[in-house]
Image (cartoon, rainbow, N blue to C red):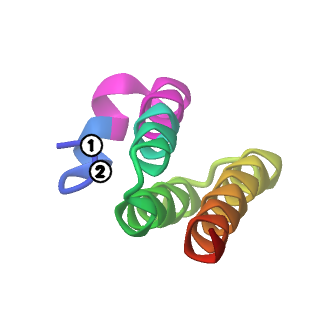
Amino acid sequence: VLVDSAEAAADTLGHIDYRRTVETFSVAIADAGNTGLAADVQKNLIATMQQRGVLQSVISDSARTLQWIAESARERVAS
């Protein structure tokens, strides 16, 4: 629901709680080793927030989380 029905989830939770929940989920997925899925979830979050007109500073914070996920993926491949 958080990803497949992102707009409905954001409407239900509000964009602040939606972001918090989805970012917690994507970081947990990345920590578990599925950085591809984590990146997809994070990209979906960013797109949803952009569509909803969320402040650019908030979107930038989420983009930094996406960057961290990408770096985690590279580190896993290198080790």
Whole-percent x, y for residue 49 in the image: 54, 53
Quarter-wise, where is residue 70 in the image?
Answer: bottom right
Q: Which mark is residue 75?
A: none
Quarter-wise, where is residue 76 in the image?
Answer: bottom right
Whole-percent x, y for residue 51 in the image: 50, 63
Q: Residue at x 55, y 60 (%)?
A: 46
Question: Relative to 42, does residue 58 appear above or below in the rendering?
Answer: above
Residue designated by label 2: 6
Residue designated by label 1: 2
Would you say the magenta stretch is mainly helix, strand or loop?
helix
Whole-percent x, y for residue 24 in the image: 49, 32
Residue found at the far front of this picture = 79
- Whether residue 64 appears in magenta in the rendering, the answer is no
- Callout 2 environment at 10 Å: few (<14), some (14 to 19), or many (20+)? some
Question: Relative to 57, does residue 74 appear above or below in the rendering?
Answer: below
Q: Residue at x 53, y 29 (%)?
A: 20
Residue type at mark 2: give it: Ala
- Callout 1 environment at 10 Å: few (<14), some (14 to 19), or many (20+)? some
Q: Residue at x 60, y 59 (%)?
A: 69
**Mark 2 secondary-structure assignment:** helix
Whole-percent x, y for residue 50 in the image: 58, 62
Q: Is residue 23 left or right of residue 65?
A: left
Q: Is residue 42 left or right of residue 53?
A: left
**Range of magenta residues:** 10-22
Judged by depth in the image, the label closer to the viewer, 1 or 2, is: 1
Contact check, label 1 and label 2, Cβ < 8 Å: yes
